[in-house]
Image (cartoon, rainbow, N blue to C red):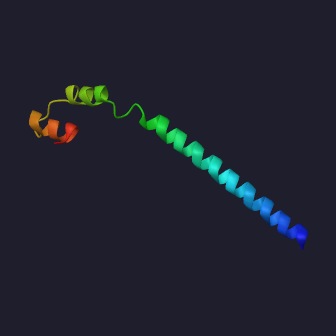
Amino acid sequence: MKLKINKIIKMTFLSFFAFNIGLFTAFIMIYKDQENKNTSANIINRHLNFPNQECYNDSDLKLIIYGQ
């Protein structure tokens, strides 16, 4: 009986540890991935390099890219 309880405690601890390592790794990967996507230089370049189309004018593009 005591051996079974010790095994359950060990498995619970290992599961908790493995879950937290996976969670930490996922947060690090998301943080590194999002770091360079939303910089102001990229937003300005997106506006300057957007092709001219008849359906959007410059004020529409500013509203879409920069917001209000």
> Residue 46 versus residue 52: which sits nearer the camera?
46
Percent coordinates x, y for residue 32 in the rendering: 48, 35
Number of numbered tags placed on the structure image? 0
The image quadrant that residue 4 belongs to is: bottom right
Q: Residue at x 15, y 36 (%)?
A: 62
> Residue 46 versus residue 41: which sits nearer the camera?
41
What is the quadrant of the N terminus in the image? bottom right
68 over 49 or under it: above or below: below
16 over 4 or under it: above or below: above
Q: Is residue 20 left or right of residue 14?
A: left
What is the quadrant of the C terminus in the image? top left
The image quadrant that residue 59 belongs to is: top left
Q: Is residue 57 visible?
A: no
Q: Residue at x 64, y 53 (%)?
A: 19
Percent coordinates x, y for residue 12 in the rendering: 73, 61
Percent coordinates x, y for residue 54 in the rendering: 10, 36
Q: Residue at x 37, y 34 (%)?
A: 37
Q: Is residue 10 left or right of residue 44?
A: right
Q: Is residue 58 left or right of residue 38?
A: left
> Residue 33 versus residue 14: which sits nearer the camera?
14
> Residue 4 versus residue 65: which sits nearer the camera?
4
2 over 64 or under it: above or below: below
Q: Is residue 50 visible?
A: yes
